[in-house]
Image (spheres, grey):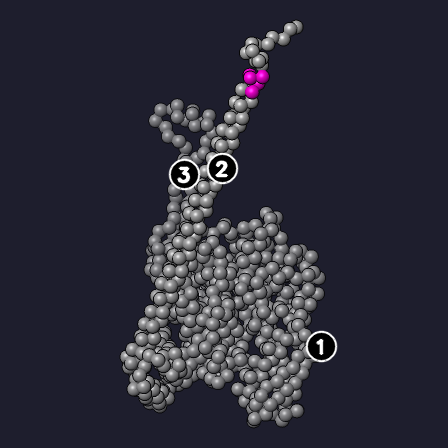
Amino acid sequence: MSGSIGLDLGNASSVIAIARNRGIDVIVNEVSNRSTPSLVGFGPKARALGESAKTQEISNLKNTVGSLKRLLGRQYNDPEVQDESRFIGAPLVEVPGGGVGVKVRYQGNEQVFTATQLVAMYLTKMKQTVQEETKSTVADVVISVPLWHTDAQRRALIDAAHIAGLNPVRIINEVTAAAVSYGVFKTDLTEEPKKVAFVDVGHSSFSVSIASVQKGELKILGSASDRKFGGREIDYALVNHFAQEFKENFKIDIFANPKAFSRVLTAVERLKKVLSANAQAPINIESVMDDKDVRGMLKREEYEELIAPLIARMEPTIKAALDQANISLDDIATVEVIGGTSRIPAVKEKLSEFFNKPLSFTLNQDEAIARGCAFVCAMHSPTMRVRPFKYEDITQYSVDYFWDPVEGEDENELQVFPAGNVLPSTKIVTLYRKEDFSVQAKYTSELPGGVLPWIGQWTIKGVKADGDEPAMVKLRFRADYSGIYTVENAYIAEEQIVEEPVEQSAEENDKEKAKDGETGKVKKVKKIVKKAELSIIHGTTALESSVKEKYIELENQMAMEDKHVADTENRKNALEEYIYDMRGKLDDLYSEFASDEEKSKMHDMLNAAEEWLYDEGEDASKAQYIAKHEELLSVGNIIKGRYLEKQEAERRAKEEEERKVREAAEAERRAREEAAAAAAAAAAAASASASADAAASKESANANDGKEKAEGAVDADGDVTMDEN
């Protein structure tokens, strides 16, 4: 099992992070990018997911699907879904149950896939990316969603994760995940709470959360979002600008040509980035349509004027978040900004102007959400230890539960979880019933038009009245960490008279004990006692088990087909590479190792293989490519073997020569050392001999000197002369 995984499921691209080795890393994909395009494409043989889908997006526009998370859990007739078709090349269709799907051409046939299936396909790709990097299996994951996602959208994401073979430990709001990242990795936080505004200017939406942050703890106080303001709306405004300009100057209508529109959209995305750092930027597209090249220029002043109405939409969203948090601008200590669109200078200026303070960019704008998700996943892992941290989120919309009324009941609907209610949360409601009944939940009128307000229905089974009196039924309503609503459990309860001991002072208790035959005082009280657990039949927007199993089987089958196609393509490429490589080496590197007859035979085989590869072998099977490659290797390896034998012989000869040189050098070194040692010994001996000779000479000289003195003291007659005093 790999580490704990966090996935920032973005509209344009997604980021994967993993908690491991006492830190959190971002995982790169197959082309070493730290984010992966959120695209799913379909081809005649296999699917293209992520980077490969982006590569062929323009050429395969009608079979490429983006905006995955914005289609998830939505109804086809939702006005926002219909508006989403502006950004999707594949046609949207209605699927059974009223949901949204896409019609694409896949493996030679027109096929329809639901939004849940599409997200599952993309999650499968993300899982494979992690597995290839970690070389281990992946299961537990925390996935982010926009804070405005409803219960239906969150359940659809959970279903998609299950189809992809993942275990979604938790679904977390995007801005909350970024706030967790801030709370965990910000080292200067103290025990004193401070108010922080977290602003996410994303690709397709704009969200703000006001949080109270202190060391080891985070509380979301208020949140708001604009689902229709983001980087892509700015891109679309630029496309409209240049579409009008191209229509006037070049007499073409890019909206009449989806591929032309897509190419212009790609061009303005680049232009937008250039304008973030330059006063003006050009746009040049060759043969955009009707064999016409187009060009244009846009100054930053014109650009900012063009997008000003869009940027102005941030202000009411920020105010709504402040209102829900019940705080003023003066209470905000820090404004932390994330999201790729926040790099636009005009966006930063507007935010700083509204909050009346400099913005903070301490979080990684592209990776903070994924890192926060990974940390939350690690919090729930039994094998990982993380620093203590608590976070508390809130509901975005109010949720009412309602039921069929019975005689004597004043109301049959109750707002159980108001907007801003803390997550997770549990509420217990008491109803009196004589038979089985159902409870439903719905969002209130705070939802935008077209969004499905219905959440689910729960049928309570096993209710039996005690005579003529209805049973007391306790319902436990639950809003969990992931923003999922349910009836967690139900049971029959009854009032019973029970005896409880009366608390007494120590003195009274001693007196009572002194009385023979008397026990402590008790009192009779009414208590609610659980009597019988009731069964619940859940009816929500989540997929039925049979449908989910079918989707899982289909996804596994498509994943196997993708792998087989990829393996086949790799074998084909390996064969083609060998043909060109061997042909070049045969007359160069391997020339002296093959006879003219062998060269001729090998050239004939290579030419035949190349002709086959570009003719009937263009669409051959994996086994055929392997067989053809092995046929060439059977002859080529003989020639290559001779070359390698010579290389090996030369290597050994070189090593032997180097060994001899090393040994000679070593012998020479030892000889020098021995000669030096001998010379030193001789010098020492000579020095010692010289010292001995000098000492002997000195001793002899001293002896002679003493003899001369003695002889000088005797007179001519041999008598000793005595000095007189």
**For mark 3, what is the residue?**
500
Q: Residue at the location (46% across, 74% down)? A: 50
Amino acid beneath label 3: Glu
- Number of residues whose C-alpha sits closer than 10 Å to that of mark 2, classed few (under 14), some (14–19) or many (20 or more): few
- Answer with mark 2 or mark 3, whichever residue precedes in sequence: 3
Q: Which image quadrant: the C terminus?
A: top right
Amino acid beneath label 2: Ser
SS for callout 2:
helix
Q: Distance between the Cα atoms at labels 2 and 3?
A: 113 Å
Q: Distance between the Cα atoms at labels 3 and 1?
A: 79 Å
Where residue 463 sits: x, y (%)? 35, 59
**For mark 2, what is the residue?**
687
- Answer with mark 3 or mark 1, whichever residue precedes in sequence: 1
* Viewer-side label of 2, 1: 2
**For mark 1, what is the residue?**
301
SS for callout 1:
helix
Q: Are marks 2 and 3 in contact (CB under 8 Å)?
A: no
Based on the picture, tell me whether residue 709 belongs to the magenta stretch: yes
SS for callout 3:
strand
Region in magenta: 708-712
Is any atom of residue 56 visible in this view?
yes
Q: Which image quadrant: the N terminus?
A: bottom left
Q: Is residue 439 above or below residue 87?
A: above
- Magenta part mainly helix, strand or loop? helix
* Viewer-side label of 3, 1: 1
Q: Is residue 226 above or below residue 417?
A: below
* Viewer-side label of 2, 3: 2
Amino acid beneath label 1: Glu
Is any atom of residue 444 visible in this view?
no
Judge from the rendering whether residue 199 lies leftward or rightward of residue 371; answer left or right.
right
Q: Residue at the location (45% across, 57% down)? A: 20
